[in-house]
Image (tube, coloured by chain):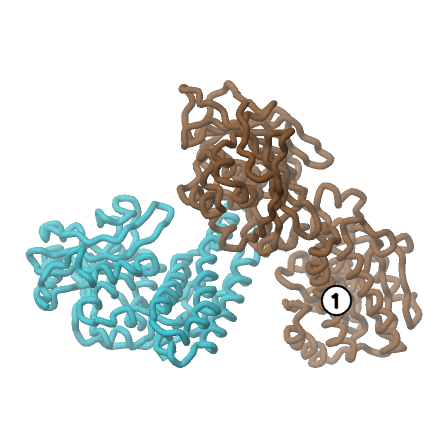
Chain colours: A cyan, B brown
Amino acid sequence: MNPLAAMTAEDPRWQSLLAHSDTYTCYSAALAAWAAFEFPAWAGIVNSGLSLTLVDEDEGLFGFVHFPSGLRAALGLARRGADDSGEGVNAILEELARHGRVIVSGDGFALPWHVAAGRRHVPHWFVLRGSPSAPVAVDPFACRNDLGRQEATLQPINPTTLASLAVAHPGDDEVVRLRESFALGDDARPLERRRFQWFERADAEIREAVGATGPAAVSRLAQHFRDHGAQADAYRQVDDIWSIARHRGFLAHLAAAQPGEAHVEWLETHVQPLAKRWSHMAPLLMQASLAIGAGRQPTGSVADTLDEIAEREAAADRACPSDAAFLLLR
Amino acid sequence: MNSLPLHSAASQTHQLRFSEDDLLAFADASGDWNPLHIDADFARGTPFGRCVVHGSLLTLGALGCLPNDVLTEVRGLELTFGGAVLVGEPVTAETRYSDKANAWEVRLSGRGKLLTRVVARPGVLPGVDSRPSDPISRRPMRVEPFAPELADEPAVGDQVEGAYGSKPAFAEIARHRNAGALDPALVEALGWASYIVGMEVPGLHGVFAAAKLSLLERDPKDGAGGYSLRAREHDPRTERLVADGRLETRSGATVAAVIECFRRRQLPELDAAALLPATPRPASGRSVVVIGGSRGFGAAATLALLGGGHETHAVYSTTAGVLGAANVGAHEERLILHRADAQDPGQLTPLREAIVERGLPLRGIVLAAALPPLAMGLTAESALPLSEYVAASIRLVAVPLGALMPLLDDQGFILFCSSSAVTAPPRDWPHYVAAKGALEYLASWAVAAAPGVRSVVVRLPKLATAMTNSPSMRIGATAPEAIAGRLIARLEGDDFPSGLTILEAEEL
């Protein structure tokens, strides 16, 4: 297949990407769109299983590591950057010419198809696919947030608009910097603050992220909210917790699509209830932070629920049948 | 006059249950984010003990038991919520048609009690035709419940206005509950009524009691997506509030409403200073354990024991509450907090280890943990939840007793917190009385198992705690501080001989 050929809405790879739209983060959506052009089993790459590493940082912040550390090396992705728009756009188009696709680390504020367009700066990764003269934005991410509904998008891009479309998030927020640093499963710090950022296919040096892992990482989060849950600052990384819920949702979705019977009980008893419980975290976190804003003491439900989830994560891991172990990256 | 389709005159029954997911979806779609429905820890601090299903969600579930051709004809709804339905709790819906009243009625029962009654009528409800003449403002919807101060009493004539719009998912919930044939304006009004009570009036401490909703013709000059509400009655003794309201729905019709609700009073915080001397007394050289030590009588007993110079281990299930450092001050060193579910033997192991490791003899055990006694009737069906309540209550006593009795010193005491309800059983508490009876027999057994031990059963009067903080239950309730102070002083003064002592409420 011609790697520079544009993707259409009828393309089965786009259809397969759309099947998981409501379970991606914008990072996993970009990885999925990027991988789908090369790996028939791309969903297995984007699936993080029950993986989670939590890196303790200063000022009560954490690095959230959703993917295993070898992912970036396996894919061969290296972050590049430029401040000059001509240099940045040219480099992005050159990568497109070489490999037919490129991940752009952008800003929802600048993307016309993004729900935050012109309203809020939010980091957002998307894939450009096709030839330098006729790129197509491939963005299968969908969600609903306080700004409205973000829909999956497949749309041609005029290359002359890339100077405004491909601009990166300002990166002036430590929460965003941490998210970007650990987005591909390794500790990619220090990140340079460049006006244009993208990922090229190249050998990447990997430094493993070190922190609490698996259920212990969830328990660490619970402890964080037990100790600091009465302070507004404790809730700065709620989007990262929402991302965990999305990853578990993806696992449940993927497991449900697997043929065979042996893993069905595990799916129904462990994975689906776990994903559901994670999905409860967003409203609980929102209510807790609103309560603080209104001068009210939040309850212990955020910490209690995370403790319960930690137990569920451990139980799901223990109960995984051998025929489904590949879903957990073991 | 319109009439509702009759179908079979025979009544039908259906089983309903509402999950945590159902409540979260309803909160999101209706805008009623009151934590009583979605926050388990908040709910534990109320008389309900667990998250309560939104009244309007119950109503949709009840209406879903009626045939579609009945629902399409409905123009008026009367809802009465006689008791809370808890998340996950099964309820039985019984439908019947009254020819005389020309109305369908759905009754939801659970725990042996009638919990909800929904009457669906084909015409406008008499007395529900509110048309306030003031223009309706469009203050945005709240995302955090209104939380008035204690002194902020609502007054008759107070008016609230604002914008309201349920999300499209709300209609989806109605369809999921088989109530999609109901007029969309009434569906939206159910979401609005829930939002009003949970978020606006009274807001955070609100409890939905009843509503009448009546579909009116739209006045062309009315806008859509706004409401007004005016307080008609307010009883400061019970905090009962009745308000007339009007919603201009986004689906094109006006709904007039009468909404009745209660405001749960906020309990005054336990007076730690009344139980703790400003300067700590010399150490007693003994340790004590209080199970259920962060709330109500247990918290008061913890403070009184700390004040007596004991190293005090307080076991609590969720939050330490009044036992925070700010309240115990200089006594903090002798207070050891253990977060554990006392029903779970494994979770008490660290407590045992801590007592042994610290090396002080264990002088006493206070068994103060109890489950909230939601009203219950005794029927063949409710016998199961009744027995589950009794079993869980026994575990709350027996598990710590089994774990800690072997550590108790020879003249040690065990304080079993029973209730005056044992001698004067309230009609709606068969489960509570049975549980406290079982606790008292465990006290008798403890004497046989450890003859030197002082086993004291205290039949506490009704105390002003989170468990009794409802309009009817708080009447005549006593503050726990004074009782705990006197009781602990008597225990320390060796006022009770070894063996079994039963203390009635009037002896305290």
Q: Is residue B286 left or right of residue B163?
A: right
Up-down relation of residue B57 to residue A200 (above or below): above
Q: Is residue B224 left or right of residue B496?
A: left
Amino acid type at circle 1 is: Ile
The residue lying toward the viewer, choosing from B431 and B480, is: B431
Expressed as whole percent of the image width and height from the top left, the position of residue B112 reads 71, 51
- Subunit of label 1: B
The residue lying toward the viewer, choosing from A284 and A149, is: A149
Bin the neighbour count of mark 1 within 10 Å (Cα to Cα): few under 14, some 14-19, many 20 and up: many
Up-down relation of residue A192 to residue A295 (above or below): below
Up-down relation of residue B190 to residue A329 (above or below): above
Q: Is residue A311 visible?
A: yes
Q: Residue at x 46, y 46 (%)?
A: B173
Q: Is residue A175 left or right of residue B286?
A: left
The residue lying toward the viewer, choosing from B309 and A168, is: A168
Expressed as whole percent of the image width and height from the top left, the position of residue A235 reads 45, 56
Look at the image and tell me in which quarter the C terminus of chain B lies. bottom right
The residue lying toward the viewer, choosing from B274 and A211, is: A211
Q: Quadrant of residue A7?
A: bottom left
Q: Residue at x 62, y 31 (%)?
A: B99
Look at the image and tell me in which quarter the N terminus of chain B lies. top right
Q: Residue at x 50, y 39 (%)?
A: B191
Up-down relation of residue B58 to residue B295 (above or below): above
Q: Residue at x 47, y 26 (%)?
A: B254
Number of dots carrying numbers = 1
Q: Secondary structure at mark 1?
A: helix
Expressed as whole percent of the image width and height from the top left, the position of residue B114 reads 68, 45
Expressed as whole percent of the image width and height from the top left, the position of residue B108 reads 63, 45
* Residue at mark 1: B394
Q: Quadrant of residue B471?
A: top right
Q: Is residue B149 visible?
A: no
